[in-house]
Amino acid sequence: METVQSYKCPCCGASLIFQNESLHCDSCGNDFELDAMRQIEDVGSQMQGESKYDWEHYEPRNYETDGEIELASYTCPSCGAEITGDDTMGSTICPYCGDAAVIKGQFEGTLRPDYIIPFKTEKKAAIEAFEADFKNAPFLPDEFKVKKKIEEMTGVYVPFWMFDCDCNAAITYGAQRTTSWSDSNYNYTKTDYYRLFRSGSVGFANIPVDGSKKADDAYMEAVEPFCYDDAVEFNGAYLSGYMADKYDVSAEESIERANERVKNSTVSVFKETTSGYAAVIPESTKISFSGGKIRYSLLPVWMLNIKYMNNTYKFAVNGQTGKVVGEYPIDNGKKWRYFAKIAGFAYIAAAVIAYFLLH
């Protein structure tokens, strides 16, 4: 039995009729070339189905010392962070909550990371990077610079799950272009509406997802990026003088965040191809990838607890690049003076414009 092909208007959904070598919509008055309608059909077929995220099951390698440094672990009695370090440690300060923690014995059953990025930013350089970052805090109290106290500063190898994948995506957008002109009588505005389609592939490597419940996820993402050219095979000797947090968020539990980061990055890359329009709104998105790989790594971060005016402010410094993240105290006087100045400039500009319009 033969079927009848029916075309619907992509603008209003009404049926199209063939007229003057094109498809015409009596409802909204638009005309469409046959090739354009075939392209729309192709887009529809590509957008069918759901997004798929295919990750391999992570198989960890059991840790073997092979004559390397013996590791010990301790549990913070306050926040529960489980930290590893060399077996000479008797006690230390928890880098996450700042409280004292006591070693509980030899580290047992740990999993060997696939690789590690060794610390490149030493303690002194990390402090210098922290102080150099003050310029990025315009409302920082002046006395903070001299009265702050570094209560605790610890170099920590933070556990991360690293995700690699090749992503295929297809996205449709509604877009607009606006043209304005005027004559001696009227001002005119013309708005053209478009449907855009983008499809392609994007490769991702080393998408990091924090594997520690105790580390602040927002800080750990903000302290990125790391340069993975410096990554080396794990060796316990790199932990000497530093702490290393075991992961307590599994690879499977991290997949949802990895999916979110892949999708957001893909959407951002595709959005960059839609410049030239006044407004671009995504209408439908299909993202799929296969061959996803997962690895376990330790990445270097300096944790700082800064004491100021009876408050503790937490900062993190990338132990490889020196990038600083954290929340500084705010001088409300500076903040209000700044906004008052902006408001004053805006008032003066408005007054000048009003004067010329009225005269």
Image (tube, rainbow, N blue to C red):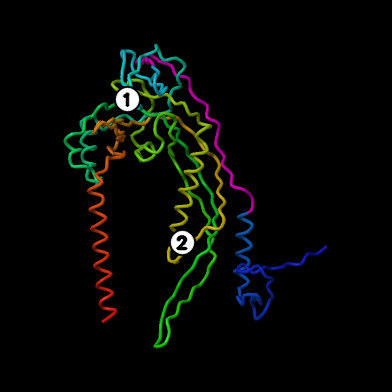
Q: Nearer the viewer, mark 1 or mark 2?
A: 1
Q: Residue 294 colored magenta?
A: no
SS label for mark 1 = loop
**Mark 2 neighbour class, 10 Å CA radius: few under 14, some 14 to 19, many 20 or more:** some
Front residue of this view, candidates 199 and 312: 312
Residue in front for this viewpoint, 282 or 35: 282
**Residue 27, above or below 256:** below
Give the residue drawn at x 55%, y 34%. Answer: 56
Please provide the residue range marked out in magenta.
48-73
Decide: is 120 above or below 176.
above
At x 69% / y 75%, what residue is drawn? Answer: 17
Residue picked out by circle 1: 98
Q: Is 16 left, or right, of 137 in this rendering?
A: right
Q: Quadrant of residue 220?
A: top left
Q: Residue 202's spot in the image, x, y percent? A: 48, 49
What amino acid is labelled 2 in the image? Answer: Thr
- Principal secondary structure, stretch drawn in magenta: loop
Number of the label disc, if any, that sits on residue 114: none
Q: Give x and y (percent) for residue 199.
A: 53, 56
Mark seen at residue 274: 2
Kind of element beneath mark 2: helix
**Mark 1 vs 2, N-terminal side:** 1
191 displayed left or right of 67: right
- Amino acid type at circle 1 is Gly
- Determine if the magenta segment contains residue 65: yes
Looking at this rendering, what residue extends furthest in the left direction?
A: 146
The quarter in which the C terminus is drawn is bottom left
